[in-house]
Image (cartoon, rainbow, N blue to C red):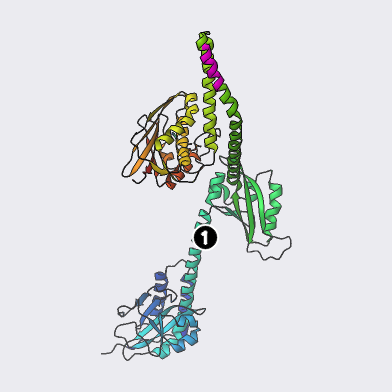
Amino acid sequence: MSPAAPPLPELGDVAAAMLDLGRELHLELSEAELADRFLTTLAGLFPHRRIALRVLDPRTREPARVYALGGELRPGLESDRVTIKESAVEKTRLKTAVAASARLRLGTRWDSPFSHVAAGYTVPLVASGELYGVLDLGYALGHDLSAVDEPLVLPVANQLALALRNQRLWRDAQGLRDFQTRLIGHANALIIGIDRSWRVTVCNRALLELTGCRRDEVVGQDLRDLLPDDQRPRLTPIIAAAMRGHTQDAVEAMIAARPRGRVRTVWSLAAIGADHGGGDRPTAEAVVAIGQDQTRLRELQDQVIQAERLATLGQLAAGVVHELNNPLTSISVYAEYLLRKAERAGTDAGDVEKLSRIGQSAQRILRFARELVQYAKPVGYEIDVVDLNAVVRQSLGFCEHLFDRGGIEVSLELDPALPPVPAIPGQLEQVLINLLTNAAHAVEGGGAVAVRTGAGPGQTVQVTVDDSGPGIAAEDRERIFEPFFTTKVDGKGTGLGLPIVKNIVEQHRGSIGVDRAPAGGARFVVTLPRQPA
Ligand code: ADP
């Protein structure tokens, strides 16, 4: 027995249902909720029909999402191509590119999405030429009401297409907004945005970190209240000009940075949504300012200048040492001569001692001067076969004054069988000098420094520098090799010593590790590959 003939809807019922539906729809509905509202409305208007909605994005290869009421669906429907009639493509003004997509097939017959339902039709859900899905209505055998239903289904399908389009646009806009928020949040530059009433609407993490402010201390405030008093008169007209659509570049502002005091920043200001109408009235929707902290740059420039001065000093010192060499040699030689003579003549023991001191001191100055020149000499770039023990001795000699002055006890344990390493000698010396200087600083005021060389794991050799200082706090371990990280106060540290060490060691294909020394202080271990036999 065939089922009863399905009732026919009236145009008025369709209009009333659409009005109800319109009231219920809002942008935050999920796709499933939206599909449910439409399918329930359609089922109310067109009972006893099979109804299926496939939501598609023909630009991507994603499978269709299928929602249906009544009737069993054909298996594999999600990934199957969708057939629509050529006449429907024309009627709905579907874009040719979309119509030619691999997900679609143009046909003349209905390709039923249901199992065992042979009569029905597909309505493409098109808005502004884009396809958002297809709606299928299927009829039981002998009850094909396509011709009567279709004109009444079309207005509902149109509204469904619009709702799907709005939802996708909404999702895209949300995605874009999240992306933009993340981009601004993580940008390295300082970013702040205000609306046309000067209220801060956005500001990023870099700005908050620099100023030490909380977000709620900035967002929502009038920007003019945040400007330092002494700069407000200069900056306000500049921002107002940006508001009128005139981009402002290279705007300098000193801003209060906690805890660094005032820092120099440079900004570019651009209007958003400006209609470029000119005139004096604000025309922009918003102004976005992007800034850079110049202090860091200035500090780096200062350091470069300082390094250049040191290099010049090195050259000067070389000249001075050269000049000193002859008189010092004379002092040393004549002191020696007079000493021998005084000893032979049985001169007063106190005077002999004084002559001996003169000779020793002259020798010491000579040695120190020669080492200074050696250190100041440009470092070579030639890889040599280097005796690490000799480098250690040489570097210790250079740092002797640091240890003597601090009353620091230095112990040395050099492995006499240490294999040589392929290295640039001047650079290895720099590694040792930096480590020894740090060790001396750590035990200032008394303590011990121990230097040891020996075989390392595999085909490597190691040099270890231990000290009995305070050691390195666990939270600083990761950071000590970062450029400009220093805990030394009063400008004693540059934070460049260890990064230079690490750089050199890595260029020598070695590694550097930091640990706790048995004496409680820091232990630095440099491991270098040995010279192949
Ligand atoms: P600087 O010595 O100029 O501060 P470095 O890069 O040589 O720069 O060292 C960075 C930081 O590592 C130091 O400020 C200090 O905090 C820590 N450090 C380095 N060597 C030692 C050590 N032997 N004992 C304790 N701390 C050390």
Q: Quadrant of the C terminus?
A: top left
Q: Pick the quarter of the image with the N terminus.
A: bottom left
In the rendered image, residue 152, in percent from the top left (x then y), is placed at: 45, 85
Question: Which residue is painted at 59% across and 32% down in the image?
Answer: 322
Q: Position of residue 203 (x, y in %)?
A: 56, 52
| Residue 257, placed above or below residue 180 | above
The single residue placed furthest to the right in the displayed view is 279
Chief secondary structure of the magenta portion: helix
Please name whichever residue, 271 or 381, is drawn nearer the observer in this view of the structure.
381
Does the image show residue 123?
yes
Task: Check the image and report above or below for 317 versus 211.
Answer: above
| Label 1: element kind | helix
Q: Nearer the viewer, residue 488 or 216?
A: 488
Question: Left or right: where does residue 69 sit relative to residue 255?
Answer: left
Q: Position of residue 332 (x, y in %)?
A: 55, 22
Q: Where is mark 1, residue-wise? A: 180
Give percent across and percent down for residue 305: 61, 42
CB at mark 1 closer than 8 A to ligand 1? no
Residue 14 visible to the viewer: no
Residue in view at x 43 percent, y 73 percent = 60
In the rendered view, does 141 fall on the left or right side of 432? Answer: left
Which image quadrant is residue 289 in?
bottom right
Q: In the depicted view, which residue is nearer to us: 434 or 66?
A: 434
Q: Is residue 109 above or below residue 421?
A: below
Q: Amino acid at mark 1?
A: Gln
Label 1 crowding class (10 Å Cα cut-off): few <14, some 14-19, many 20+?
A: few
Number of numbered labels in the structure image = 1
Q: Is residue 120 above or below residue 40?
A: below
Q: Residue at x 45, y 36 (%)?
A: 432
Tell me the magenta residue range.
Answer: 332-342
Is 341 contained in the magenta span? Answer: yes
Q: Residue furthest left?
A: 1
